[in-house]
Amino acid sequence: CQVCDFIFRDFQNRLSPQDEKARYLNHENDVFDLGYQEFLKPVVEAVRENQSPMQAGLDFGCGPSSVVSHKLQEAGFQIEGYDPFFAPQETLLKKKYDYIICTEVAEHFHEPLAEFQKLRGLLVPGGRLYVKTGLTDKIQDFSNWYYHRDSTHISFYGEKNLEIIRVRAGFERLVLEDGFFYFSS
C-alpha cells in the first residue's frame, strides 16, 4: 500500500482453505521443541509479567498445539485456544478476555483490519493483544526475506500500518517490543 506500507499477497496467489490447512499440518510446532520455545519466549514472559494467572486468556490461532499456551498453563495461567482449522470453538469468540495471544498468526489474516477489530472486541477494557509476527521495518531486502516465502503468509506489517490498525481497530496503545508487539485497549 502506497499510504501505509502494508504488504499483502495478491488474491490470485493465495491458497485455498484446504491447501492452507494442509500446509499448516506440515508445520513443526512441537510444544517440547526447545528452539521453538525460545523463539516464543518473549511473548510468554510478557504475559507472565503483565497478566495474572487468574485472568482469562485466549490463544487465537492456536493450531493443533501451542507452545505459548503450554508454557503459560505450566505456570498456572488459564488460557483457552481457538483456531479456525484445528479448534473452531465459536463459543470462545463470544466471551471477553483480559489478554489474547496471537503468535505466528497475523501474517495469515486475509482481512487484517477486520481480524484486529474482532480481537479488540473480545478484550475487556484495559486488555492486551500480544502479537508475534515478522515485521517489515527492519528488512532490507523483502524479496529475499524467508518469511514471505511461506505460501500461507499473506499479510506483512510494519510500524506505520500497525499504528493505523491501532486507531481503526480502537486500541489505545501500540507497544513494539523486541520480538513482538502488543495493543492495549
Image (cartoon, helix red, strand yellow):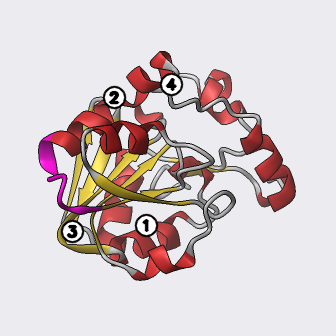
What element does badge 1 sit on? Answer: helix
Callout 4: 10 Å neighbours few (<14), some, many (20+)?
A: few
Where are the magenta residues, as a range?
Answer: 49-56
Q: Residue at x 85, y 51 (%)?
A: 19
Q: Nearer the viewer, mark 4 or mark 3?
A: 4
Callout 1: 10 Å neighbours few (<14), some, many (20+)?
A: many
Residue 88, image x and y in percent? 62, 68
Image quadrant in which the C terminus is located: bottom left
Q: Earlier in the sequence, mark 3 or mark 1?
A: 1
Residue 4, image x and y in percent? 45, 55
Q: Which disc, if any, is residue 32?
A: 4
Q: Please give the residue where the numbered disc 3 appears in the rendered image.
A: 185
Three-letter code, disc 3 = Ser
Q: Earlier in the sequence, mark 1 or mark 2?
A: 2
Image quadrant in which the N terminus is located: bottom right
What element does badge 4 sit on? Answer: loop
Q: Please give the residue where the numbered disc 2 appears in the rendered image.
A: 41
Q: CA distance from mark 3 to mark 1?
A: 12 Å
Q: Residue at x 46, y 17 (%)?
A: 34
What element does badge 2 sit on? Answer: helix
Against 143, residue 122 (above or below) is below
Q: CA distance from mark 2 to mark 4?
A: 13 Å
Q: Nearer the viewer, mark 2 or mark 4?
A: 4
Q: CA distance from mark 4 to mark 3?
A: 32 Å
Q: Nearer the viewer, mark 1 or mark 4?
A: 4
Q: Is residue 126 left or right of residue 84?
A: left
Against 170, residue 161 (above or below) is above
